Image: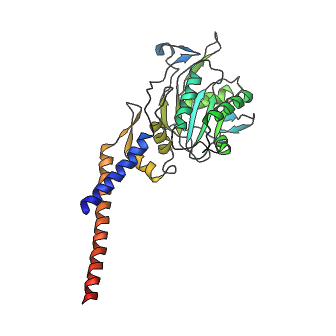
Amino acid sequence: MFVKAIRFSVLFLALILAGELRAYEKPSYGPGQVVIGNEKLKEADFKDIKIDEKLGAKLDLEKIILRDEQGAEHPLNFWFRGKPMVLAMIYFKCPGLCGMLMNGTVGALKRINFDIGSEYDVIFVSINPEEGPELARDKKENYLKDYMSREKSLASVSAGWHFLTGTDENVRAVGQTLGFGYRKDEASGEYAHSAGFFVLTPDGVLSRVHFGVEFEPRDVHLSILEAGRGEVGTIVDKLLLYCFRYNPDSKGYAFAAMNLVRVGGLVTLFGFGLYMAMFWFRQRRINKERKNEV
């Protein structure tokens, strides 16, 4: 009986983790690329135009002012609503990498178990100060259509997802804090920049950076869960995060073997406790029946 209880508990844990992992198929993705328009450049030519991973850096949510899709100006803390934040720096008329980055980001967000506006929020910030609210509205409308499904609330998603513009000074303050380098090429009018997006805590602290234009949904899910500091996700999500740890070399999450062993030990202990409780109640019932027979 005890062995069966243990086997059942371990099998139950394995099925839970397998179910979570099976929901995500791992696409291939590479490190951030330095580009200008749709032309890839050698990183040596633009050493300051890259993503410098500044984990722990904090945005000044009160001093940085940006514009929403209606043209209203607000400090950044207006959009930080006590949830983790996914933030990407792009520009809307970018002829190359920005579209790939936005599509890759949204594609990954569509495949995780969290919803924009519910468990986390998203802001796309234009690095081109000449772009305004009208263009931002058009982009938001298009991406909302791509993201939405019957299960999602349009009002909730729209309230949690914003396409922002601003002055060069304010936008550069965001980029400099997060380590996102970019530069305008005066000859072409395009911007040289890197590819990737950022995950921040509810108070604006940089928690994780995802490099490239294609992203593993499992890593995105775990980084949002991690940035939520225990306030986001189910018990299963928290168990999954406990069994994974961020690997700075691979820029992704990998199994934490010892944590998995600890979870297995707890499951075994739970199974043993369950068995002892069942055994005690069974023996008590038997003893009671024997007394009644006498």
Q: Closer to the camera, 48 or 270? A: 270
In the depicted structure, whether residue 94 falls above or below residue 246: above
**Colour mode of the rendering:** rainbow
State the image quarter where residue 144 is shown.
top right
Q: Position of residue 146 (x, y in %)?
A: 62, 33
Quadrant where the N terminus lies? bottom left
- Residue occupying the point 65% across, 36% down: 162
Q: How many marks?
A: 0
Left or right of residue 69: residue 172: left
> Which residue occupies the foreground of this view, 138 or 134?
138
Above or below: residue 141 compared with residue 38: below
Image quadrant assignment for residue 68:
top right
Quarter that holds the C terminus: bottom left
Residue that sits furthest to the bottom in the current view = 294
Q: Is residue 257 left or right of residue 66?
A: left
State the image coordinates of residue 185 (x, y, percent, origin top left).
Answer: 61, 13
